[in-house]
Image (spheres, rainbow, N blue to C red):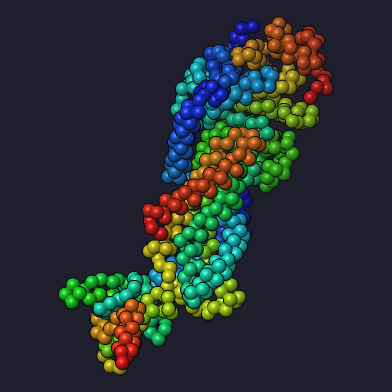
């Protein structure tokens, strides 16, 4: 094998390309990016998280700004406590709403943040007070049937 | 024919009672012979008689089932892998077909033993390589690849590689096979020259009777798993049936006609 | 070792004999791998050979990997779309394509394609070196062929497979994107975001990388072993090549099952 600079270059490019593909998959697709030291971590308590999973996206007006880091049970009030890893540049007022919504009809569930109007903003480690639990389909249908029954009894 | 080297000479390599079987076939059954220091010994025999195997036993590539293969005091058959590796540094081997690494240039091939086992500076390595290549008649071929060389040239490059570390013993496996008569003569005179100039102990396996008779100091004839051993004169005069048959098949008349006959005969 | 006479054995004896031979064989493979590893631990600075082997194993595999990636992704896109459209869930196409690729199709198909192309070529190369006595030539120069020839090839193959896997997956995602967005009219942003939402790092991506490394180790070992232990004949080279492809592929598929079952990927 002679020293072939072209060959070396090609191998180098191949390795770079492969690593770039791997990096894309790891960070962009796999979602490694949001957990940064000094990032913004907030908590929210829900009565019912439905089928919310860890790594579910957190978005504001449909734009992804973070993801669900952990889900646990808050022992005192028996509520679900969700930890959110968010973009550190966010400034969320303390009366921000956190709602669990479903993307599409059959889609996965995610957390939608609705910023409030107050001046004071939440700092890392604080809890979002205003939350709305996941809507359960059975509950809706049951409610609909009940209402229909009530109206039907005339 | 007792094969004693005679006054002043000594055996460098000695086989004693070597047995070797391959699968169901018995290759050697009590092979005993000796190779004299500083001489060219040609190993003759029909195909499958075990000529290549003999060389491989010396090189430690194969181990015998029993018996000893001594180089000097050390029995190759009893050495550990590491000791065999060390042992090989005094042996150079020319394989049938050359066995150059086809992914490397001629320079890299010939330089390989130096690069791996010595600390020579690059320019010294280059000098050694070009000296050897010139010695075998291949100056300036450093940058070529083995596939770009003809059979004879590749063989000579492999010879350059075999001698680049100045080994004491040179093993040549069928160096003439597949070559035209001109190249046969070339390699033959190279080998003789190396032997005379450097005093190498050389073992050459061959089918090629004329070259054998010209260059051999001694002949080892392999037959039926054992060796018949002696000078060319003794071998030609032998009455052993295998030898007689072998010589006849090669179109040879009895001894007295041949010794002293310098003309190259036609049989390839 | 004496030849055994098969014709004299009853069927049960044959089975027993074959099983013992298999065990012996596996044992020698393990020993072989151990020797290769040991050669790596005493490293020789032969980067040039390693780079060349990376070229042979990796760069030369790029065309088939990228092309197959694109087409597999496109097929997944089409198939996935038709099935999801029945439920009105076309929006999840990105997720479907991504998950099937990352977890299974990426590592397995990459490994199988690699076995057919790069591993068989390596086995053939090593086997032909055996036939032309190049390996014996190295031994006679006190150079260990496992160290000089085999280790760099094995290492190169293992290093290269995860990269090829990642490239395959990316090309396939792109193939699905092309079909879904340009051909079937999906929204590109939705494709990407459903993909990103569904595929996670701990389970999916790391499982994919793990699988491709394991597959790489298996395939590389099979290829170098079959090449190294081949008969020094032309038939031996051919046997080394075909058995590499067959055994390598079977190993990939079997280990895929084992890893999926154990890891839950």
Q: Quadrant of the C terminus of chain C?
A: bottom left
Q: Position of residue B113 (x, y in %)?
A: 56, 38
Question: Which residue is nearer to you in this view: A48 or C112?
Answer: A48
In the picture as drawn, the residue positioned furthest to the left comes out as A76
Q: Residue at x 72, y 7 (%)?
A: B237
Q: Is residue A117 above or below residue B127?
A: below
Q: Is residue A154 left or right of residue B71?
A: left
Query: Can you see residue C264?
Result: yes
Q: Residue at x 52, y 74 (%)?
A: C85
Q: Is residue B177 left or right of residue A6?
A: right
Question: Which residue is nearer to you in this view: B187 or B250?
Answer: B250
Q: Position of residue B224 (x, y in %)?
A: 63, 13
Question: Which residue is nearer to you in this view: B245 or B136?
Answer: B245
Q: Position of residue B37 (x, y in %)?
A: 59, 19
Q: Position of residue B129 (x, y in %)?
A: 63, 40
Q: Residue at x 63, y 40 (%)?
A: C238
Q: Residue at x 60, y 75 (%)?
A: C183
Q: Is residue C143 left or right of residue B243?
A: left
Q: Is residue B10 above or below residue C120?
A: above
Q: How many marks?
A: 0
In the picture as drawn, the residue positioned furthest to the front comes out as A154
Query: Can you see residue A58?
Result: no
Question: Which residue is nearer to you in this view: B200 or A82?
Answer: A82
């Amino acid at each position: 094998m002679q020293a072939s600079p072209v060959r070396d270059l090609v191998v180098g490019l191949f390795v770079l390309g492969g690593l770039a593909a791997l990096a894309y998959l790891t960070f962009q697709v796999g979602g490694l990016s949001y957990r940064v030291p000094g990032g913004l971590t907030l908590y929210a308590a829900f009565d019912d998280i439905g089928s919310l999973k860890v790594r579910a996206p957190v978005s504001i007006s449909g734009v992804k700004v973070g993801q669900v880091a952990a889900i646990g049970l808050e022992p005192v009030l028996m509520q679900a406590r969700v930890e959110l890893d968010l973009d550190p540049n966010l400034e969320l007022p303390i009366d921000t709403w956190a709602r669990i919504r479903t993307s599409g009809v059959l889609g996965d569930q995610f957390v939608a943040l609705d910023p409030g109007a107050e001046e004071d903003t939440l700092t890392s480690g604080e809890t979002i007070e205003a939350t709305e639990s996941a809507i359960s389909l059975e509950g809706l249908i049951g409610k609909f049937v009940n209402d229909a029954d009530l109206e039907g009894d005339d | 024919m007792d094969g004693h080297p005679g006054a002043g000479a000594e055996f460098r390599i000695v086989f004693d009672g070597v047995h070797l079987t391959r699968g169901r076939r018995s290759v050697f059954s009590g092979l005993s012979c000796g190779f004299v220091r500083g001489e060219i010994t040609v190993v003759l025999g029909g195909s499958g008689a075990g000529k290549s195997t003999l060389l491989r036993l010396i090189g430690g590539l194969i181990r015998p089932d029993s018996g000893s293969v001594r180089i000097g005091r050390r029995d190759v058959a009893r050495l550990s892998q590491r000791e065999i590796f060390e042992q090989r540094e005094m042996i150079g081997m020319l394989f049938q077909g050359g066995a150059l690494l086809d992914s490397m240039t001629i320079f890299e091939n010939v330089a390989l033993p130096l690069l791996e086992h010595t600390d020579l500076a690059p320019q010294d390595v280059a000098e050694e390589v070009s000296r050897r290549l010139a010695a075998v008649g291949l100056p300036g071929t450093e940058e070529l690849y083995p596939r770009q060389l003809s059979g004879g040239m590749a063989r000579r490059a492999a010879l350059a590689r075999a001698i680049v570390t100045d080994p004491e013993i040179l093993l040549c496996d069928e160096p003439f096979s597949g070559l035209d008569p001109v190249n046969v003569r070339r390699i033959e005179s190279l080998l003789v020259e190396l032997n005379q100039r450097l005093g190498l102990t050389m073992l050459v396996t061959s089918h090629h009777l004329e070259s054998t008779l010209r260059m051999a100091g001694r002949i080892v004839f392999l037959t039926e798993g054992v060796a018949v051993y002696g000078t060319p004169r003794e071998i030609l005069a032998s009455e052993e049936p295998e030898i007689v048959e072998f010589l006849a098949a090669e179109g040879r008349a009895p001894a007295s006609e041949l010794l002293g006959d310098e003309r190259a005969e036609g049989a390839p | 070792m004496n030849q055994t006479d098969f014709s004299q054995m009853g069927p049960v004896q044959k089975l027993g004999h074959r099983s013992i031979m298999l065990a012996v064989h596996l044992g020698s493979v393990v020993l072989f791998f151990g020797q290769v590893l040991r050669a790596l631990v005493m490293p020789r600075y032969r980067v040039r050979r390693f780079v060349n082997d990376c070229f042979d194993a990796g760069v030369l595999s790029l065309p088939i990997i990228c092309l197959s990636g694109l087409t597999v992704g496109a097929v997944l896109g089409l198939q996935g779309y038709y099935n999801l459209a029945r439920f009105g869930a076309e929006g999840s196409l990105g997720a479907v394509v991504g998950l099937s690729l990352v977890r299974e199709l990426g590592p397995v198909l990459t490994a199988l394609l690699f076995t057919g192309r790069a591993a068989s070529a390596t086995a053939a190369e090593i086997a032909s070196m055996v036939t032309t006595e190049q390996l014996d030539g190295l031994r006679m120069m006190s150079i260990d062929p496992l160290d000089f020839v085999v280790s760099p090839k094995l290492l190169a193959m293992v290093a290269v497979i995860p990269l090829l896997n990642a490239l395959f997956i990316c090309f396939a995602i792109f193939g699905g994107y092309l079909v879904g967005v340009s051909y079937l009219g999906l929204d590109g942003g939705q494709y990407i975001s459903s993909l990103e939402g569904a595929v996670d790092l701990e389970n999916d991506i790391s499982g994919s990388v793990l699988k491709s490394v394991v597959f790489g180790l298996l395939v590389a070992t099979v290829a170098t072993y079959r090449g190294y232990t081949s008969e020094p004949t032309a038939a031996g080279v051919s046997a080394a090549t075909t058995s590499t492809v067959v055994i390598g592929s079977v190993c990939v598929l079997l280990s895929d099952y084992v890893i999926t079952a154990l890891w839950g990927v």
